Image: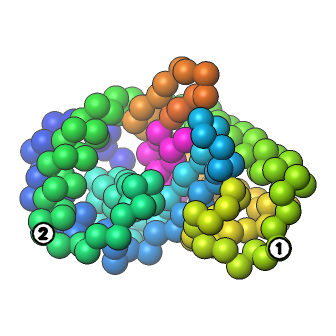
């Protein structure tokens, strides 16, 4: 993986717009965990096989756009105007704030695994107090762990990173009381975007 940087975002507008346009056609899997409580941590992971993307920039943009759709709960059509607006507003105003800092592969693996286990425990406790009548729910109906937008039984959820991490880039971090971090990861088999 080349170390992605802000200049690449600025210099490759047309290429990035094409990645945005194609992002809805990519096989991207999501894992979203949230408690439903304001200011509680959330856990967002978007991943796809590396051969699904042209390169790491395509991986980052495609995964990030899918994340943005879920966070903003958008229902927009993917067209050139939409992709240009994503580039002009979201990428140039938000992504250019990223640090693109290389971080330890081992500490990245440990951090994400720990956060996934913490969210699982938190949601298991919530489920004891607020059981569901049905698990036939689509994101974001209720607090829970959603895999590809379908709620999972918390006790059956096991998060794993497939293959060894080759590179990990910290996009942003905040040391506030709730913690907040975004990472872009390359493993032997896939690209992963992580946000909390």
Mark 2 closeness class: few <14, some 14–19, many ≥20 residues within 10 Å: few
Residue 80: image tag = 2
Relative to 74, say whether 175 is above or below: above
Would you place residue 53 above or below residue 25 in this image? above
Q: Return the residue nearer the eye: 158 or 162.
A: 158
Residue drawn at x 13%, y 58% as measured from the top left: 84
Quadrant of the rendered structure where residue 32 is?
A: bottom right
Tell whether 29 sits left or right of 72.
right
Q: CA distance from mark 1 to mark 2?
A: 42 Å
The residue wearing badge 1 is: 133
Q: Is residue 21 magenta?
A: no
Looking at the picture, tell me which residue is in the foreground, 159 or 166.
Answer: 159
**Residue at the location (35% across, 70% down)?**
75
SS class, disc 1: loop
State whether residue 147 appears in this view. no
| x then y, percent, for residue 50 | 42, 65
Residue 130 visible in the picture: yes
């Amino acid at each position: 993986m080349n170390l992605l940087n802000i200049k690449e975002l600025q210099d490759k507008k047309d290429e990035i717009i094409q990645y945005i346009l194609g992002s809805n056609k990519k096989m991207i899997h999501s894992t979203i965990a949230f408690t439903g409580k304001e200011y509680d941590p959330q856990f967002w992971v978007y991943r796809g096989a590396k051969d699904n993307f042209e390169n790491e920039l395509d991986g980052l943009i495609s995964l990030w756009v899918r994340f943005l759709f879920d966070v903003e709960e958008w229902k927009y059509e993917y067209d050139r105007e939409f992709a240009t607006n994503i580039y002009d507003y979201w990428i140039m105003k938000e992504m250019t704030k990223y640090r693109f800092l290389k971080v330890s592969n081992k500490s990245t693996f440990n951090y994400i695994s720990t956060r996934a286990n913490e969210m699982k425990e938190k949601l298991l406790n919530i489920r004891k107090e607020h059981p569901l009548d049905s698990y036939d729910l689509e994101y974001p109906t209720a607090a829970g762990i959603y895999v590809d937008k379908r709620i999972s039984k918390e006790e059956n959820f096991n998060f794993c990173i497939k293959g060894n991490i080759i590179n990990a880039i910290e996009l942003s971090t905040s040391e506030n009381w709730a913690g907040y971090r975004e990472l872009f990861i390359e493993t032997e088999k896939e690209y992963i975007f992580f946000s909390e």
